[in-house]
Image (cartoon, rainbow, N blue to C red):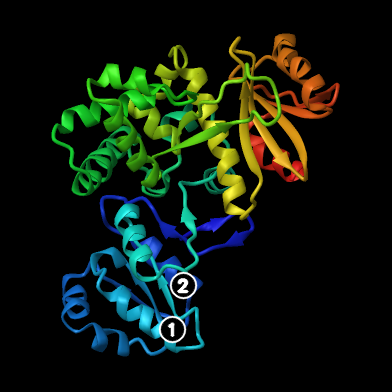
Amino acid sequence: MRKSGKKSFFKISRYNDYRAKTKRENRINKKIFPNKEYVNLEDPQIRMFALEDPRGFLNKLKNGAVIDEIQRAPELLSYIQAIVDETKNKKKFVLTGSNQLKLINSINQSLAGRTALIKLFPFSLDELLGYIGKKSKFDLIYKGFYPRIYDKKLNPTQFLSDYFETYIQKDIKQLVNIRDLNLFVKFVKLCAGRSGQILNILSLSNDVGVSHTTVRNWLSFLEAGYVIYFLRPYYENVSKRLIKSPKLYFYDVGLASFLIGIMGKKELETHPLFGSLYETFVVGEIMKYLSHRNLKNEVYFLKDNSNIEIDILLKTKNQLFPIEIKSSETVNSVFFRNFKIYAKYFNLKKGALVYSGREETELNGIEIVNHLNIPKLLSGII
């Protein structure tokens, strides 16, 4: 549990640091809900009590509780449902878990319509900068944004290797019938190499050596587990020449970097995929910013079949706000070409260019900002 921007939210955890909550997380849970008892079903004795005598277990929690790792005892949810339906206190229980797939599946079966789900992403940029100060673009992209890397000063490569093995390989394997785990690992790594690119199911299918149906299923589970997400294209009432396939992104750019073989931030300086990773980083920050503030703004990209593209198109207050993303530290006039091409079709009067340079200014209605100021940029748009 962490602060998100200026507000504190209790969030259902969708990722797991080696299947164990840190003491820091437990302290914060208790701080946010000081009047609620905290119980962790990862503890074998507590879990056994909950499974063998669910009524007795819940009756001991008369004032409600924060129940952590609820997916370890899904049978409890039916009993909690009865309590919620019988009481006027609809905020009696706060349920958290580190396995998103199991957690959501259990909640949907027992507590559908009775819950408010709040998602916990890795650190956002504004959270991280307040925690450790400014870092270079190479450092941010190499390390990513998982809290334990910073909180415990862990080696990013080692942490992400363990994370990938425990969460993606083992947790997903428990829920999905994967006959050849090596093929699945290959598939996830190929997805990482395509982060920031148009999704091509046929290409992935051919490169992995599995059917397109299998690729779709595996993508669905990675998406449900909050490993990847898809950015939709914008093509409302415009030319049929626009691309209508989504773009694939990883939620954490550090994980994507690790999966394509980056073992140190120096490697990023000349890596051919650095531009895509930088885009993954920036788009991820925009998505986290909106989610943390419970904003329902629509986020798209715009691209036609001649590869003329706007990286981000925000639809807010019935207006479209384009954002271009460039990893360069130098502003080039070429960066504004796509703005001009699409401006006449969508009446785009303002926009933004996010890049890695220091100089920030405005040019013909286009705000030029460093990636560290993404939160400030978005606060002025939305």
Q: Going 52% across and 32% down the picture, which residue do you hit? A: 281
Q: Nearer the viewer, residue 332 or 92?
A: 92
Residue 24 lies, with reference to residue 195, above or below; the image says: below
Residue 311 position, x and y percent, is 62, 25
Q: Which residue is mark 1?
A: 85
Calculate the distance from the C-alpha at mark 1 to the C-alpha at mark 2. 9 Å
Q: Going 75% across and 14% down the picture, which residue do you hit? A: 341
Q: Earlier in the sequence, mark 1 or mark 2?
A: 1
Q: Nearer the viewer, residue 216 or 192?
A: 216
Q: Name the amino acid, label 1.
A: Asp
Q: Going 63% across and 30% down the picture, which residue do you hit? A: 234
Q: Which mark is residue 261?
A: none
Image quadrant in which you'd find residue 29: bottom left
Disc 1 vs disc 2: Cβ atoms closer than 8 Å? Answer: yes
Q: Name the amino acid, label 2.
A: Arg
Q: Which residue is mark 2?
A: 114
Is any part of residue 208 visible from this angle?
A: yes
Residue 39 lies, with reference to residue 222, above or below; the image says: below
